[in-house]
Amino acid sequence: MPQSLAQVYLQLIFSTKDRRPLLSDPGLRHEMHAYMAAILKDRDCPALLINGPVDHVHILCRLSKAEAIGKLIGETKRLTSLWIKRREPDLAEFNWQSGYGAFSVSASNVKAVQKYIAGQEEHHKKVTFQEELKAFLEKHGVPYDERYLWD
């Protein structure tokens, strides 16, 4: 085949360091999500939706065939962390957690994942971030050691 073709969707999830509720300003969150979308677009990994509550973010994006997942997330976290610190001097100590969750999404499930991500604030009135992440890990068969899951 003379072409390299791919259509890989991912749901990425990561939290603020120690799950601190530093993203309580809806305007800041909205701007940060737009900034993340620009970062992802520049890396040829367009975001379909980005949303999250005060302590973490969910990203649904299409992965470029030339991009490594860890590098994409690391660079997105690094650049948004720098952006938040410049935009909000009161958040000079803002950091993302060191880890992340990355889950494959089938093309047939993209709309359902978009709906799930869009409803994050309502969802987290009932479920904590920790409960949510453990459920994702179990649903996707990802082995984990809870001693090392949170930072």
Image: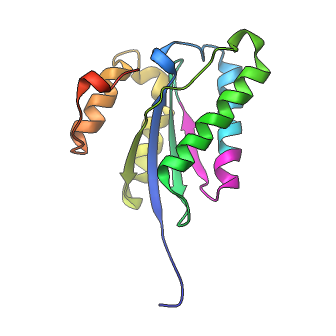
Q: Is residue 61 magenta?
A: no
Judging depth in this view, the residue of 60 and 20 nearest the camera is: 20
Judging depth in this view, the residue of 136 and 68 nearest the camera is: 68
Q: Report x, y in % for residue 127.
A: 33, 19
Side of 116 relative to 85 (left or right):
left
Q: At 30% from the left edge and 26% from the top edge, which residue is drawn?
A: 148
Q: Report x, y in % for residue 32.
A: 68, 30
Judging depth in this view, the residue of 62 and 113 nearest the camera is: 62
Q: Report x, y in % for residue 99.
A: 43, 33
Judging depth in this view, the residue of 63 and 100 nearest the camera is: 100
Q: At 40% from the left edge and 23% from the top edge, which residue is drawn?
A: 123
Q: Is residue 46 magenta?
A: yes
Q: Is residue 38 above or below residue 1?
A: above
The scheme the figure's colours follow is rainbow
Q: Is residue 124 above or below residue 71?
A: above
The residue segment tinted magenta is: 38-51
